[in-house]
Amino acid sequence: MATTTTPVKYAKDLTKEPPRSPRLRIGGYVLLARMADKGRAALNGTVGEYHFNCPVDNLLFSFKGLKGEDVQQVLASGKSDDDVAAWITSNGTRKSPEEIKAWSDATEAVNYYHVPEKREWFAEECKRLGLDPARTTLFDYLEEDDRVSFRK
């Protein structure tokens, strides 16, 4: 992702602090706050070791039928989190508030240990962090990885 010459409004410096929790819901969507932090930081050149438009961000993009590049243009425009959520709701595949809540609830509960193609990777990552992979959700893992990364 290209950086902009003008600092992007609301951008965090992810070399100094982690993105917000994937659990934080904006417009009813989990992952939106974290994705927005990474997208804005990528535009600002302060994304550090994080990645925008990664497989986790694409959980949200796929649910809504959106492309990361389109969302990043919205982030580059300086829109607030609520405005980004409104844009996401208005674009891509239409979803009812009930569908958004059900998706967010299910996504928050995802445990990659129970997904055969992700099990080995997830078990290793959890072991590195001292977590029990069978009882650790993806969001638990992301939050612990953030904590460990910024304790150094």
Image (tube, helix red, strand yellow):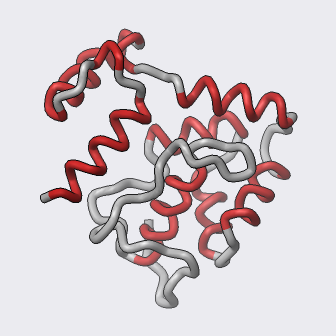
Identify the residue at image location x=72%, y=26%: 102
User: Residue 152 vs residue 5: left or right?
Assistant: left
Compared across the picture, whether 120 is left or right of 47 comes to: left
Position in image of residue 116 (x %, y %):
37, 9
Note whether 79 is above or below 128 in the view shown: below
Residue 12: x percent and y percent?
44, 72
- Residue 32: give x, y in percent of width and height: 60, 51
In which image quadrant can residue 75 be found? bottom right
Q: Residue at x 35, y 67 (%)?
A: 14
- Name the foreground residue: 69 vs 113: 113
Query: Eyeballing the image, is 129 above or below 76?
Result: above
Tell whether 101 sits left or right of 97. Answer: left
The residue sitting at the bottom extreme is: 6
In the image, taking residue 55 as reference, residue 131 lies left or right, namely: left
Q: Residue at x 57, y 28 (%)?
A: 107
Q: Quadrant of residue 101?
A: top right
Residue 10 x, y percent position in the rendering: 55, 76
Q: Quadrant of the C terminus?
A: bottom left
Q: Nearer the viewer, residue 47 or 140?
A: 140
Q: Judge whether 127 appears above or below 142 on screen.
A: above
Number of callouts in the render?
A: 0
Q: Quadrant of residue 139?
A: top left
Which quadrant: the N terminus? bottom left
